[in-house]
């Protein structure tokens, strides 16, 4: 229930740090009109992601890039098992590869053009605060919810919201204004 959402209305989900798509499959299975845009830079995960989303044709897109504060290229640190990879090295993610990046606010702006209420899941291995700081959430009234694998991102957001901490490490921010 980390990403619990209502099933009585449809959303466009942005799965930032999609990995192999477990959260995306959850979102897609809640309502037959839900759509997901996945962002995953680890090429070793993309085949699994595509296979896991295959049951939802026409409702998903996968973009093989990292979402960052700036558009361009960055060093991405892979782990052997495809988990815990990110833009910062850590004990298990230490295989450097170059990846393309897209600015978080551009990703939000493109999604907002759909006119569908948005829900964003951020799981970017320690870069969540940097992404949240890079966006003025007041500019995205279509953004309904933000799930952030963090315990501190909600305090960085000035747009009115209610915060629930799930499982001790997932902030569920429901925008109220």
Image (cartoon, helix red, strand yellow):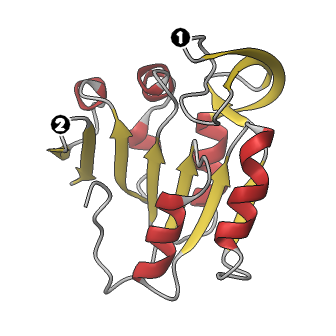
Is residue 96 toward the left or the right of residue 115 in the image?
right
Residue 49, image quadrant: bottom right
Residue 119, image quadrant: bottom left
Instruction: Count all numbered tags in the image, as a single digit.
Output: 2
What residue appears at the point 28 percent right and 64 percent down from the top-left corner? 4
Question: Any mark on residue 160, and which?
Answer: none
Label 2 vs 1, first from the N-terminus: 1
Task: Give the CA separation, mark 2 to mark 1.
Answer: 22 Å
What residue appears at the point 66 percent right and 82 percent down from the top-left corner? 55
Comparing 170 with 83, the one in front is: 83
Is residue 127 toward the left or the right of residue 148 in the image?
right
User: Where residue 129 sits in the image (x, y, percent)?
Assistant: 41, 22
Neighbourhood count class around disc 2 (C-alpha, 10 Å): few under 14, some 14–19, many 20 upward: few
Q: Which residue is mark 1?
A: 91
Q: Residue furthest front?
A: 80
For the residues carrying marks 2 and 1, which lies nearer the camera in this image? Answer: 1
Q: Is residue 21 above or below residue 79?
A: below
Is residue 23 toward the left or the right of residue 173 in the image?
right
Residue 78, image quadrant: top right
**Dot 2 lies on which element?**
loop
What residue appears at the point 25 percent right and 32 percent down from the top-left corner? 154
- Tell me the quadrant of the picture where the N terminus can be found: bottom left
Question: Any mark on residue 168, and which?
Answer: 2
Question: Pointers 2 and 1 in contact (CB under 8 A)?
Answer: no
Neighbourhood count class around disc 1 (C-alpha, 10 Å): few under 14, some 14–19, many 20 upward: few
Comparing 53 with 121, the one in front is: 53
What residue appears at the point 44 percent right and 27 percent down from the top-left corner? 128
Q: Is residue 55 above or below residue 102?
A: below
User: Where residue 157 sits in the image (x, y, percent)?
Assistant: 30, 31
**Dot 1 lies on which element?**
loop
User: Where residue 11 sits in the image (x, y, percent)?
Assistant: 46, 72
Q: Is residue 30 above or below residue 98?
A: below
């Amino acid at each position: 229930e980390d990403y619990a959402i209502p099933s009585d209305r449809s959303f466009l989900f942005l799965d930032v740090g999609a990995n192999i798509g477990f959260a995306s499959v959850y979102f897609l299975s809640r309502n037959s009109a839900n759509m997901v845009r996945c962002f995953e830079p680890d090429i070793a995960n993309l085949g699994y992601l595509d296979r896991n989303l295959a049951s939802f044709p026409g409702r998903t897109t996968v973009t093989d890039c990292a979402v960052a504060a700036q558009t361009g290229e960055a060093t991405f640190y892979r782990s052997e098992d495809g988990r815990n990879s990110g833009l910062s090295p850590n004990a298990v993610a230490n295989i450097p590869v170059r990846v393309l990046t897209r600015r978080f606010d551009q990703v939000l702006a493109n999604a907002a053009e759909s006119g569908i209420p948005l829900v964003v899941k951020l799981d970017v291995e320690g870069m969540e605060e940097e992404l949240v700081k890079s966006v003025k959430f007041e500019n995205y009234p279509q953004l309904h919810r933000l799930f952030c694998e963090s315990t501190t991102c909600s305090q960085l957001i000035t747009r009115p919201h209610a915060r629930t901490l799930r499982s001790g490490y997932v902030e569920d921010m429901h925008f109220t204004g």
